[in-house]
Image (cartoon, grey):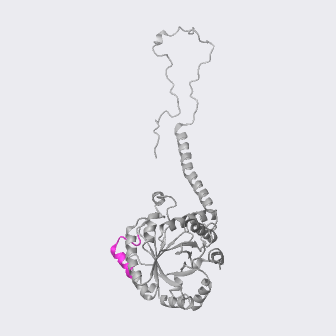
Amino acid sequence: MERSSIRSGNDGERDVTDTTPTGHDPEDAAPEGTTPEGTDAEATPADPTPTPRRPRRLRWTLRTLLALVLAVILPVLGTQVALRINYAGDLADGTLTRGKDAIWLGHAWVDGRKKDADVKALARRLGQTGIRDLYVHSGPLEHDGTLPGSAYPRARWFIEAVHREMPGVRVQAWLGDVLATEGPTGMRLEDDGTRANVVRSARAILAVGFEGAHFDLEPLHSGDRDYLRLLDALHAVTAAQGAQLSVAAHQIDPLPGFHSFWGTVAGHPKWWSQAFFGEVARRVDQIAVMSYDTMQPLESTYGGYVAQQTSLALEATPAGTDLLMGLPFYHENRFGHWAHAETVPAAVRGVRLGLSRTDADRANFGVALYVDFAATEGDWTAYRRDWARK
């Protein structure tokens, strides 16, 4: 930010100096008792006390603060208006489930807490919906990329129970960890040994019977080439075994280069560039956008934001890769997520608007529900009514 240079010492004050006209000797002044021609002897002498004025430094500070406030508020207001407008419009016919939806499931399904009755209840819940994939939490990975078998002791039982009660539904292992991208601890993808351990962990979960590996590594910065190397190695393993490789993806820059700006001001880039999103999408079988935690304050602006994200993701994702948009099946209130704004109806309408405008006939498309243990009856009703139409 540029700053004006203001001389100190006399801010806002007038310098009271000798008023004798330049070029006149004081001894040439009119004799005492006389007045120069053209002057009024009865005039009141001028008051030398300066008139108080607001210091220029204060005025400059106030103007600078006003300019900064306007520079922040006006773009925000403009963005909110644009998102609200983006939430309006008609939905194309047929922009409904393609039978390729997914749901994230908690760890209780593979650690022994769930029983046969729970699987039967889940089957009833998912019956006649578009859900084809279950991402069941089976980690987390250790920071060195390893995964102890003790993390998923009942995985084989769950997989077999799902196949029995829900034929055609696939079970994928949801694996994740915190990356050391914004702090001193976490997984370091730049380490060759760590990436090799992650690949070995994927082999291990496929050997148990999982039909895919779903990775959620955060915070993952846009342009991370080590992540792309990891995906290349993982896809070679999953493809050889006829299994799925899927990932949870960050949102796409709502404005070009926005991740760089946000990284500078907040230290957390959060978004990916659309180009990097496309690079990831080309390396996997499924990519699920975490289209929640958006900082939007209203249902209308959240829905407009989801519509924008859907369009951006459709543009970047190859037709052969399954693209899924996340639905917020949870109701926390914290920074970045307001439950009254990020609702399932708003998300579904946003998804359908983006699909209608960009690629209404995209076959490999669906939604992903986050997360089973926090979902309410209202969430399920909205999903069935507005998307699954069941």
The answer, for residue 98, to whether it is visible in the render is yes
What residue do we see at 60% from left, 61% from top? 86
Q: Quadrant of residue 144?
A: bottom left
- Residue 373 horizontal/vertical position (percent): 58, 79
Q: Quadrant of residue 350?
A: bottom right
Q: Is residue 234 above or below residue 35?
A: below
What residue do we see at 53% from left, 9% from top? 30
Q: Nearer the viewer, residue 4 or 270?
A: 270
Residue 194 sits inside the magenta stretch: yes
- Residue 351 horizontal/vertical position (percent): 58, 69
Left or right: residue 339 compared with residue 170: right
Q: Nearer the viewer, residue 14 or 106?
A: 106
> Quarter holding the C terminus?
bottom right
Q: Nearer the viewer, residue 4 or 91?
A: 91
Count numbered badges in the picture.
0
The answer, for residue 201, to whether it is visible in the render is no
Q: Is residue 159 above or below residue 279?
A: below
Q: Tell me the magenta residue range.
A: 185-201
- Residue 133 horizontal/vertical position (percent): 52, 81
Residue 328 sits inside the magenta stretch: no
- Residue 386 horizontal/vertical position (percent): 64, 74
Residue reaching furthest to the left: 192
